[in-house]
Image: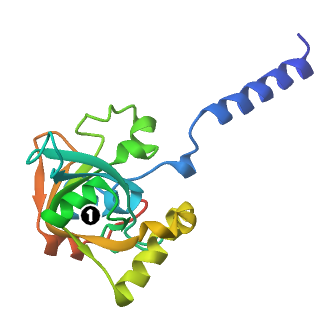
C-alpha cells in the first residue's frame, strides 16, 4: 500500500471514529457528588421532562400511586431557577388527581440526557444521577405564569400550538423535600433552602 493511500485510509478512519465518538464538548459534567444540593439543581435544569406520581382518583386504582410523564422546565437553558414549571390541562387524568389532592412527587434522571449513555451507566445505577422531589402542584397566574410560559415554550415550542380549547394553565411544583441518588451509599436528602441556595454549573472541571 502506497504512503498516500495509507494516509488516506488513516484519515477516513479518523473521520469515522470522530463521527461515532461523543464529542468532548457535548459531554455533560455534573458537580461533585459530595455537593448534593448542586447536583440536585443541576439535574433539575438538565431535564426537560419528569415522571410525576399522584394519588389516583380514578377507578379501579382509587387511592393508589399513579405515575405519569410531564414536560418541565426550570428556566431558559443556562438560567436555572430550580422550580419545575409545567403546562397543564384539567382534561388530563393526573391533573384531576391533583385537584383532589395537590400533593405529588416528581422524578428526574440524567438517563434522559447523554450523560449516562456516555459513561455506560444503566438508568437504575446510582451513578446515573436522579432526583425525587416531594411537594405539591400549584396553579400560577400573573408574573410568575408569564415567566413559566417563557421557560416552558423555550424548551417545548410545540406547546405553542396545543389546542386552545383544552384550557391550558401554568403550574409549578412547590418543593418541600429533595431526594438525591447520584453515588453509592444510599439516597441523600436536601432541604428546599439548601436546594435553592445552590448554584448549578453546566460544566465542572
Extreme-left residue of the structure: 63
**Residue 46 seen:** yes
Quadrant into which the C terminus falls: bottom left
- In the displayed structure, would residue 21 be above or below residue 105? above
Could you say where residue 42 lies in the image, as x and y percent from the top left? 33, 61
Could you say where residue 129 lies in the image, as x and y percent from the top left? 28, 46
* Displayed quadrant of residue 35: bottom left
**Colouring method of the image:** rainbow
- Residue 13 located left or right of residue 36: right
**Residue 135 seen:** no
* Displayed quadrant of residue 46: bottom left
Quadrant into which the N terminus falls: top right
Q: How many labels were placed on the picture?
A: 1
**SS class of the residue under badge 1?**
helix
Extreme-top residue of the structure: 1
Residue 20 vs residue 141, the one in the foreground:
141
Residue 75 vs residue 182, the one in the foreground:
75
- The residue lying at 43 percent from left, 74 percent from top is 79
- The residue lying at 26 percent from left, 34 percent from top is 124
Report which residue position mark 1 lands on. 38
Label 1 environment density (alpha carbons within 10 Å; few <14, some 14–19, many ≥20): many
* Displayed quadrant of residue 37: bottom left
- In the displayed structure, would residue 81 be above or below residue 36? below
Could you say where residue 180 lies in the image, as x and y percent from the top left? 18, 52
- In the displayed structure, would residue 98 be above or below residue 12? below
Residue 19 vs residue 166, the one in the foreground:
166
- The residue lying at 32 percent from left, 60 percent from top is 44
- In the displayed structure, would residue 191 be above or below residue 49? below
Residue 70 vs residue 114, the one in the foreground:
70
- The residue lying at 8 percent from left, 48 percent from top is 63
Amino acid at each position: 500500500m502506497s504512503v498516500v493511500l495509507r494516509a488516506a485510509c488513516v484519515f477516513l478512519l479518523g473521520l469515522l471514529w470522530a463521527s461515532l465518538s461523543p464529542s468532548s464538548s457535548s459531554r455533560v459534567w455534573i458537580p461533585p457528588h459530595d455537593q448534593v444540593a448542586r447536583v440536585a439543581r443541576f439535574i433539575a435544569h438538565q431535564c426537560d421532562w419528569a415522571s410525576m406520581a399522584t394519588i389516583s382518583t380514578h377507578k379501579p386504582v382509587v387511592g393508589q400511586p399513579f405515575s405519569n410523564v410531564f414536560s418541565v422546565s426550570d428556566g431558559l437553558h443556562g438560567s436555572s431557577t430550580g422550580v419545575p414549571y409545567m403546562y397543564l390541562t384539567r382534561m388530563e387524568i393526573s391533573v384531576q388527581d391533583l385537584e383532589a389532592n395537590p400533593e405529588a412527587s416528581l422524578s428526574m434522571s440524567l438517563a434522559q440526557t447523554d450523560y449516562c449513555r456516555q459513561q455506560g451507566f444503566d438508568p437504575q445505577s446510582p451513578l446515573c444521577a436522579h432526583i425525587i422531589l416531594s411537594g405539591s402542584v400549584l396553579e400560577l397566574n400573573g408574573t410568575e405564569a408569564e415567566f413559566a410560559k417563557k421557560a416552558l415554550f423555550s424548551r417545548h415550542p410545540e406547546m405553542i400550538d396545543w389546542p386552545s380549547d383544552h384550557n391550558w394553565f401554568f403550574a409549578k411544583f412547590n418543593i418541600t423535600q429533595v431526594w438525591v441518588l447520584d453515588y453509592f451509599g444510599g439516597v441523600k436528602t436536601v432541604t428546599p433552602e439548601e436546594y435553592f441556595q445552590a448554584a448549578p454549573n453546566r460544566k465542572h472541571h
